[in-house]
Amino acid sequence: MQNGFCSKGGSYDKLGIDLSHYQKIIPKIKMALSHCRKIGIPVFYTQAVREASGIDLFTRRHRIVPKKREERIKKIPICVRGTWDSEIIAGLKPSKEDHVVIKRRDSAFQDTELDLWLRSLHVDTIIFCGADTSVCVDNSVRDAFNHGYDVVVLSDAVASMHPNFHNATLETIKEWYGLVMNTRELMRNAQAC
């Protein structure tokens, strides 16, 4: 939930992507964050960053990059480190107790310290919210499951620019990876740590 993906004037907005799907989940994420903090569930943010030099871009490594992704990489750089674009949106800023994981790929687990941090806190279940359901959330959910974590995805606190992809991803998660529930269900069922 960074300016580049969710805010007017951010990269996605400049690329002509409809931000409404991302903006409508902000209140639900706020509710989930508030509840988790209140009952002592540790909160982790992921922050996607790219280097201004382009050294970490897919186009430097892959010979085959899907056209849509390549256009987004080359046309308007998204979430370049140190820019407003890469910052977490104002309404969802982390608290001083929260943890921020910098990531460069779709999964929050790939080449990050997330697994180490979660294990050091004896976390066994991860509750996911954010953007994009069918890309970053999906990749992170699959990696979490394959690392041995139980998975919960908040259906009304995740979004995709493609509603069909969003729905298909939630169905896949339900079938193969974990629980899918809405924020109110989480608030009814989550217990204090």
Image (tube, rainbow, N blue to C red):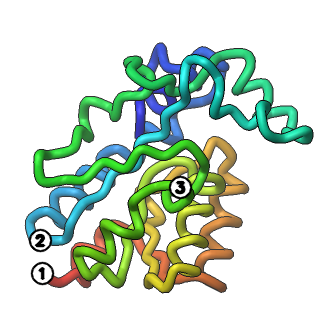
Disc 2 is placed on an element classified as loop
- According to the image, label 1 marks what residue? 192
Q: What amino acid type is highlighted by mark number 2?
A: Gly
Q: Using a 10 Å C-alpha cutoff, classify the residue at mark 2 as few (fewer than 14 neighbours), some (14 to 19) or many (20 or more).
A: few
Badge 2 vs badge 1, beta-carbon distance below 8 Å: yes
Disc 3 is placed on an element classified as loop
Disc 1 is placed on an element classified as loop
* Image location (x, y in percent) of residue 35: 17, 65
Q: For this view, does 65 lie left or right of residue 115?
A: right
| 58, above or below 147, in the image | above
Q: In whole angstroms, how far apart are the C-alphas of marks 1 and 3? A: 30 Å
- According to the image, label 2 marks what residue? 40
Q: Earlier in the sequence, mark 1 or mark 3?
A: 3
- According to the image, label 3 marks what residue? 111
Q: In whole angstroms, how far apart are the C-alphas of marks 2 and 1? A: 6 Å
Q: What amino acid type is highlighted by mark number 3?
A: Asp
For image coordinates 40% across by 49% down, the residue present is: 46
For image coordinates 38% across by 21% down, the residue present is: 82
Mark 1 or mark 3: which is in front? Answer: 3
